[in-house]
Amino acid sequence: MSALAAYASQPELTRGRRHDEAATPTLGQSFRNPHQRDRDRIVHSTAFRRLVYKTQVFLNHEGDLFRTRMTHSLEVAQLGRSIARALHLNEDLVEAIALAHDLGHTPFGHAGQDALNECMSAYGGFEHNLQSLRVVDELEERYPSFNGLNLSFETREGILKHCARRNAELIEEREPKGVAARFLNGTQPSLEAQLCNLADAIAYNAHDIDDGVRSGLLTLEQLQDVPLFWRYYEGVMQEHPQLQSQSRRLLYESIRRMLSDQVYDVISATQAALHVHAPQSADEVRQCPALVKFSEAMFESSQTLKSFLFRNLYRHPQVTQTTDWARDVVRQLFTLYLVKPQEMPPAYAQRSDVPRAVADYISGMTDRFASREHARLTA
């Protein structure tokens, strides 16, 4: 990792962990900084392993080559580290946030999340970002003295990228001036957290094009309506006309160029914003407006792509049919466990807050486990 800029999150200035821990063994000096330790804890967690069987648009059984939550998280980490290196940000912190940002996602992607939020509407609702924080703070069971992974403040702050005001107030009561404070006082998170948020959007827009075309639900003819993609596609065709009969190579190269230009755009636009506001520390960053950004032109192009995917992929009849089924599975599981909590493992069944225990249990399921549980309980 290159030398950190003054505005980066400095590992030695971490705001620490919720629970005190003994110092790590050293060989002359510590070989892992706090954010490297966070990353390692995340990679070894149960919730991270489950991401390989959780998907976003296409359910796990619909094909082996579609992105899963894990492959998406790895792509976000790769994009994030590349940009962080150019901006002299804390790459280890970016990687930790990227790898943890989807830990709280339900089975069946956004359909499962929407259904679980609906089921929990009378019990405080369900937010996947808040659930990701809950996973690393409470639900992982690895250490003898505390629940969760006991991650650093900076990683936890990046994981909680969205939060309803009421939930932010509840967190603030338990943790004054903590990870939810910015949702109440209007400040920003670290540059590393801002970067992960944008890298997330870049990654899923690109891989949804790839998976959409691979699935046959999107066609290259439709993508002519997306300038952000089509200009690269036409450029590849002009430079490599022999690829006309090799659609996979043609699509891959077009997406690769689109991703590269977005990365360079973020680097350039962020450098310009940093020059204007000139923060001299991570704390000064928090008092500035959001600094990690696209240029105006790239932002508009990205929004056009996002709207296209919403209309043509996420609302495609074949996807809708599958997601309607997924919502029914989650709703029925919630109702069944609420009535018969003993059908859950004892660690969940014996908790006093049954609705939240049910939500925690369902949100931790993989696509295929949720399907099997539903079949078992409705047979």
Image: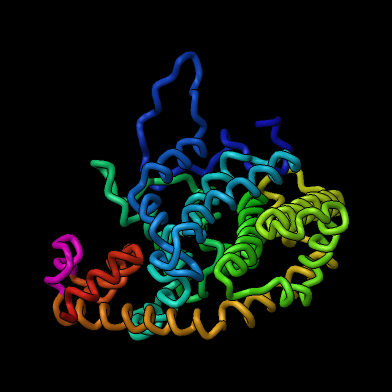
Identify the coloring. Answer: rainbow
In front of the other: 61 or 288: 61
Answer whether residue 118 is magenta in the image: no
Q: Residue at horizontal 80%, vertical 50%?
A: 264
Answer whether residue 349 is magenta in the image: yes
In the picture, the quarter occupied by the N terminus is: top right
Q: How many marks?
A: 0
Q: Residue at horizontal 47%, vertical 74%?
A: 110
Q: Residue 266 location in percent, x, y?
A: 77, 54
In front of the other: 85 or 184: 85
- The answer to which quarter of the image holds residue 291 is bottom right
Secondary structure, magenta segment, majority class: helix
- The answer to which quarter of the image holds residue 238 is bottom right
Q: Residue at horizontal 44%, vertical 77%?
A: 111
Residue 309 in view (yes/no)? yes
Q: Residue 66 location in percent, x, y?
A: 50, 61
In the picture, the quarter occupied by the C terminus is: bottom left
Q: Residue 314 location in percent, x, y?
A: 56, 78
Q: Is residue 307 above or below residue 291?
A: below
In front of the other: 260 or 338: 260
Q: Residue 260 location in percent, x, y?
A: 76, 51
In front of the other: 205 or 33: 205
| Extent of the magenta region | 341-351
Residue 288 in view (yes/no)? no
332 horizontally vs 288: left or right:
left
- The answer to which quarter of the image holds residue 198 is bottom right
Q: In the orientation shown, which residue stands out farthest toward the top?
A: 28
92 horizontally vs 111: left or right:
right
